Image (cartoon, rainbow, N blue to C red):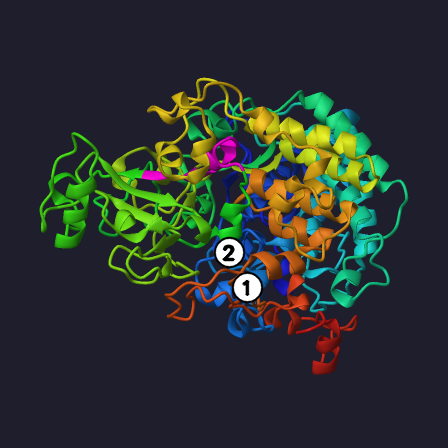
Amino acid sequence: MKKYIWILALALVNPMTSCQDFLEEEQVANLTQDYYNDENGLEALINGLYVYARIKHEWDASGARPTQAETDAYMSTSPAWARMEVGTYGNDLSSIASNVFNMLGTSNSNYAPMGAYPHINNCNIALDVLENIQPGIFGTDQTYANRRKAEILMLRSWAFYLTSNQLGDIPLTLTPRRQDSGIYYYPKASLEDIYTQMITDMQFAYEHLPTSAPKGRLTKWAAGHFLAKLYLNRAQAAGFAGAEEHLRMLYKGNVPSDLDNSIQIATEVINGVGGLAPDYHTLFDPAVSETNPHPEVLWAAQFDTNIGLNGRFTGNRSVNYHIGNYTDQTGVNRSMIYGRPFGTFKPTDWGYDNFRDKLHDSRYAKTFRHEYISNMGSNSTSYNWNAVSAAWWNANKPAGAPEVRSGERRIQNGARALIYLENDRENALDSMKAMSQPYQFMVRWVRSATTGNYYYRLFINGANLGLATQTAPYLSVKKYVDPMRGGSSDESNFNSEAGTRDAILMRLAETYLIRAEAYGRKGDFGSAVADINVLRQRAAFKGGEQRPNVLVEWYPEANDLTPAERVAPYTAAGDSYNAIMVTENHFTPGTPEAQREGYIPTVSSKQDMFVHFIYNEKNREFLGEGIMWEDLHNAGILYERVMHYNQMASSAVGLWPVATNTGGGNGQDGRGKGQMQKHHTFRMWPFNYMIQLTDENGRPLDATERSAYQNPGY
């Protein structure tokens, strides 16, 4: 805990003329506390607070893993993490405890402390100077001072929010600490008190922040979005006071006006911003998002092509974490456009299947990288034709396609190298057909025409990939791919981990779903459906848009397209909104639409189906964006949805189809592989944190006191 009082300061450079202009790091060992007592020092400190916005995207050993993985739709590729084994999730010395410790606040010999509580202390110092010393413009211009105070309060609330999402009751530190007294007394405050403080602070922020600001700085609309979400989160748990323990721990108070307040603030934000980006793809296309981001992006963590400005981890490392291995015998080399394949996180099978209208909802096409093209020339690593596959191809190839011979290189340079098909068992592809294409074809389910056996996720050599594919090829989220890794587009940077893209933290699309959920929880399903359909209208393919070749050529749903739409280049004939428009039938028990959503069997009422539909839709809209763990957690439905939809984390049986190839521990035998328990919906307090705690007199806590501090189940 003594590390928590250290100061992280950042200098202001080129005032607000570029997206990262206020985030140049400066080591401060040679500075004193007096540095922050004048106008320039305080301004620098406030600007430095924005570094904390990067916490979800700098490092998988800090904020990335706890906020991304082991949800219903997203998982770790490592089997130990994905199964939530004892060594990764089981106690205060487990791997996830190390992540939490890093999130709380750690340091090393070369860098100032990172994490929530060093940041919160810096916020408190900034507030103290602003309010009590009032240097320069902070004392002469009240509007300016209130604006900067609003930024500080929101950035502090963001840290309280992210930390309480993980741990529940946490220390609510509101006063600055500038010296090490040897007393590390940090009692926990209740979530109810924490939410009261955050909402009070965010009300101030919403009132005083401007409607527009330089890129990366907080605005009134970002504050309103966050405030509306806090009201909703408190309302979600209002009925949990007498519930079982993992739900009771979510209780944040019971304020009858919360849903109305959430609706009101969300409405003001929606009206103020003016609408969603017309094309979902442009939100994540760096050619657009890095130069001219749409106002739908309410707040994004800032990174820079000058990687020296990006801090300890040199940039946005999320650009690496979501990409499966596309280079294994494919004739595809690592490249800037495809990204560095760390293979850390991937969708669950349900995460793919949750896109119920893959040929009409363009988010499925625009979220994933469906195809890779060979780029290695004469040095190709392509695998070769064998006698059986060559014979099948020559007998069944399209007219005009050349014949092939056993032993020849299968994938040609500049041609299709790797594609994916996320099908179900009922639509299993013929195994010979899948294995005899002039490219790698990663198919979830194939069936042998000879034996009738069903096989789940086979590699090109017939080996089992299984459920936790690690760095094997898998259909990857492409929202983070960064062709400027390492600071430029030079292909020599293809192995760089240093991402330069900004990382979206808040979008107006979520504001719509916040308001929709609040409407629905009040029983106003008509207004909720109208908000959901704003997203669906954007998600629909528009006339003239081209669907990815793979979707039309291989997905069975393509049979529903018009004949003209099934002809290359697979151009949409018109707007597909009518095919994906939501009605109340989508969450009304007994309707075909509700059956198709695949609700958990215990979710049987219209009200409960509505809540779960909202989170189905959130997964479709925000897959891989790092908000779903905390959103499912705060809604009180994380455990039940993981148990029903995430086979690797679940211990349930009988929920999944069975394959013939069940070996390897992660094979598809229809059984859950995981060890998730209800108490895992909150994290443990790390041992390395608790051993530093003292009572108010400086006496270290003993084992009994540390046990009382620990969250239940650990």
Res 103 quadrant in image: bottom right
Disc 1 crowd rating (10 Å Cα; few below 14, some 14-19, many 20+) is many
Q: Looking at the image, which residue sits at the far bottom?
A: 703
Left or right: 549, with 239 as reference point: left
Residue 649 badge:
1
478 vs 166: above or below = above
Q: Which residue is mark 2?
A: 75
Residue 572 is a magenta residue:
no
Q: In this view of the protein, which residue sits in the foreground, 539 or 7?
A: 539
Residue 360 is a magenta residue:
yes
Answer whether residue 210 is visible to the viewer in this image. no
State the SS at label 1: loop
Task: Estimate the x, y position of residue 594 in percent, counting from the top left.
Answer: 66, 43
Left or right: 445, with 252 as reference point: left
Q: Residue shown at 67%/48% (left/top)?
A: 631
Q: What stretch of residues is rendered in magenta?
A: 357-371
The alpha-carbon separation of the residues under discs 1 and 2 comes to 8 Å
Amino acid on which the number 2 mark rests in the picture: Met
